[in-house]
Image: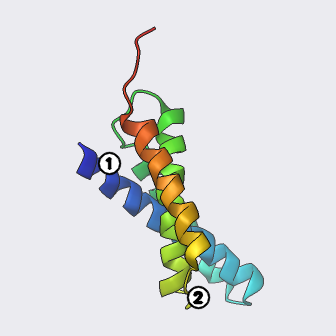
Amino acid sequence: MILRALLIYALAAFAEIAGCYAFWAWSRLDKSILWLIPGASSLLLFAGLLSRVEVEFAGRAYAAYGGIYIVSSLAWLWRVEGQKPDRWDGVGAAMCLLGAVIILWGPRTTS
């Protein structure tokens, strides 16, 4: 279950970042408006993937996703945009990942 959730989150993050980057490329890098077609498709894929995480509440799935998204964004920064993250990026990302783990798999009390 843990590996499946992490895989879904990683795929969702890639889809979201790629979709948002397509809009960024069109609006800020003077790329063709046709970049919006795969960008919108990628964002639809992101939404579909995120709904597949096995948690009881959507808000908890989205909150935990935030940590994965941050790490994935820094990987994108490095690999796609050629800017190596610095140590503060790494410290912040590690804190966010810890938060995601606590949100997803922390012990729950029944109410």
Q: Residues within 10 Å of mark 1 (few under 14, many from 20)?
A: some
Q: Quadrant of the N terminus?
A: top left
- Under mark 1, the amino acid is Ala
Q: Nearer the viewer, residue 19 or 93?
A: 93
Q: Nearer the viewer, residue 36 or 75?
A: 75
- Residue 54 location in percent, x, y? 33, 37
Please identify the quarter of the rendering in which residue 51 is found.
Answer: top left
- Residue 20 location in percent, x, y? 61, 69
Asked whether the viewer can see residue 37, the reply is no
Residue at the farthest top position:
111
- Residue 90 location in percent, x, y? 52, 70
**Residue beneath disc 2:** 83
- Residue 14 location in percent, x, y? 45, 68
Asked whether the viewer can see residue 45, the reply is yes
Mark sitting on residue 87: none
- Tell me which residue sits at (36%, 26%) in the image: 107
- In the image, residue 101 above or below residue 31: above
- Tell me which residue sits at (54%, 65%) in the image: 91
**Residue beneath disc 1:** 5
58 on left or right of 109: right
